[in-house]
């Protein structure tokens, strides 16, 4: 997709048009993977997870003060993602999850060898990146899989609600937004925009309850809409705070007009774990 950007700019298209085209391609890719099946979902979000984790390590190490162990972290991230995917499909015994602990132990041993004064900070950033980025993306596979059975309705519904929240927050905030939500972190966000996002997310949840009435009852779709909206906005704020802390404007340039993977999926990173916790708690699965 980054290769498309120069060609579009040469044609004199505005940033808004480029952003819209890139967003459309991105949306079709995400929804298309869910329609194609579990392997497509797993591979696409493994790609997003890997790029997102590398973006995080690049941001965290950008000042030169800290040095996340990129290679070790990427291996750990792949292990967490792959083992989670295989375990969800009942293709892997629980005992193999201890490989994650074994590799994490080896990472600590390697820090003894390097004797870096920032060893604990470096290791903390390395492991935190896996929790922050990899686990939520691995959660997409959990959302898509009943025990031994794939269904596209929940992941499609999740992203439609997430995008409805973003759309509602943007247009309501632009039109009537007056009261700043958290100006120290994100000057453009308003309480009115937050309310608009929540309402749009709940409206999307209502529509999905009619479209996918065999998946969940209305109340669960509505609660899912509220969770995604609230924690999606918190995810946006958290990623903004991360970038401000390290003096970065965008996490990357993968998606023209949108930035990197962390920029595009900031809402998912905090909302996906809470959505999964809710669905498992109320025994939807």
Image (cartoon, rainbow, N blue to C red):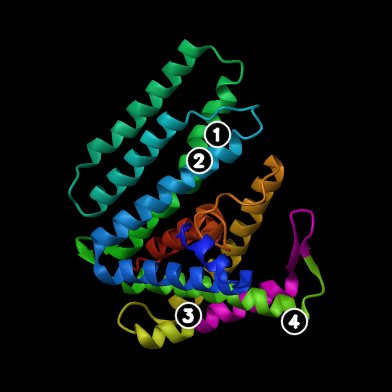
- Which numbered disc, 3 or 1, marks the residue that appears first in the sequence? 1
Locate residue 271, reporting x and y percent: 51, 60
Residue drawn where x is 71% and y is 43% of the image: 247
Residue closer to the observer: 201 or 67: 67
Dot in front, 2 or 3: 2
Magenta span includes 147: no
Where 209 falls versus 100 (above or below)?
below
The residue under label 1 is 125
Dot in front, 3 or 1: 1
- Which numbered disc, 4 or 2, marks the residue that appears first in the sequence? 2
Circle 4: element type: helix
The residue under label 4 is 175
The residue under label 3 is 205
Dot in front, 4 or 2: 4
Q: Are marks 4 and 3 in contact (CB under 8 Å)?
A: no
The residue under label 2 is 129
Q: Are marks 1 and 2 in contact (CB under 8 Å)?
A: yes
Q: Please give the range of residues in magenta.
A: 181-204
Where 114 falls versus 279 (above or below)?
above
Q: Are marks 4 and 2 in contact (CB under 8 Å)?
A: no
Locate residue 64, reporting x and y percent: 64, 28
- Which numbered disc, 2 or 3, marks the residue that appears first in the sequence? 2
Image quarter where the C terminus lies is bottom left
Locate residue 279, reporting x and y percent: 40, 65
Q: CA distance from mark 1 to mark 4?
A: 39 Å
71 horizontally vs 250: left or right: left
Q: CA distance from mark 1 to mark 2?
A: 6 Å
Q: Residues within 10 Å of mark 1 (few under 14, many from 20)?
A: many
């Amino acid at each position: 997709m980054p290769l498309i950007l120069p060609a579009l700019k040469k044609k004199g298209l505005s940033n808004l048009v480029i952003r819209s085209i890139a967003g459309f391609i991105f949306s079709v890719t995400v929804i298309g993977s869910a329609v194609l099946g579990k392997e497509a979902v797993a591979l696409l979000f493994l790609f997003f997870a890997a790029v997102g984790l590398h973006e995080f390590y690049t941001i965290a190490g950008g000042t030169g003060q800290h040095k996340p162990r990129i290679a070790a972290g990427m291996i750990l991230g792949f292990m967490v993602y792959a083992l989670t995917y295989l375990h969800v499909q009942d293709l892997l015994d629980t005992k193999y999850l201890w490989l994650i602990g074994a590799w994490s132990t080896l990472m600590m041993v390697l820090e003894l060898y390097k004797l870096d004064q920032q060893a604990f900070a470096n290791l903390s950033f390395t492991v935190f990146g896996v929790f922050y980025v990899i686990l939520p993306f691995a959660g997409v596979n959990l959302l898509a899989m009943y025990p031994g059975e794939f269904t596209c309705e929940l992941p499609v519904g999740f992203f439609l609600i997430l995008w409805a929240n973003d759309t509602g927050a943007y247009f309501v905030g632009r039109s009537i937004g007056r009261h700043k939500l958290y100006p120290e972190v994100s000057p453009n966000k308003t309480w009115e925009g937050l309310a608009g996002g929540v309402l749009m997310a709940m409206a999307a949840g209502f529509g999905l309850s009619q479209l996918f009435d065999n998946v969940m009852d209305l109340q669960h779709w509505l609660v899912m809409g509220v969770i995604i909206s609230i924690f999606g906005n918190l995810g946006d704020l958290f990623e903004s705070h991360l970038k401000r802390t390290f003096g970065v404007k965008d996490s990357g340039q993968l998606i023209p007009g949108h930035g990197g993977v962390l920029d595009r999926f900031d809402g998912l990173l905090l909302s996906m774990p809470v959505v999964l916790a809710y669905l498992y708690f109320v025994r939807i699965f």
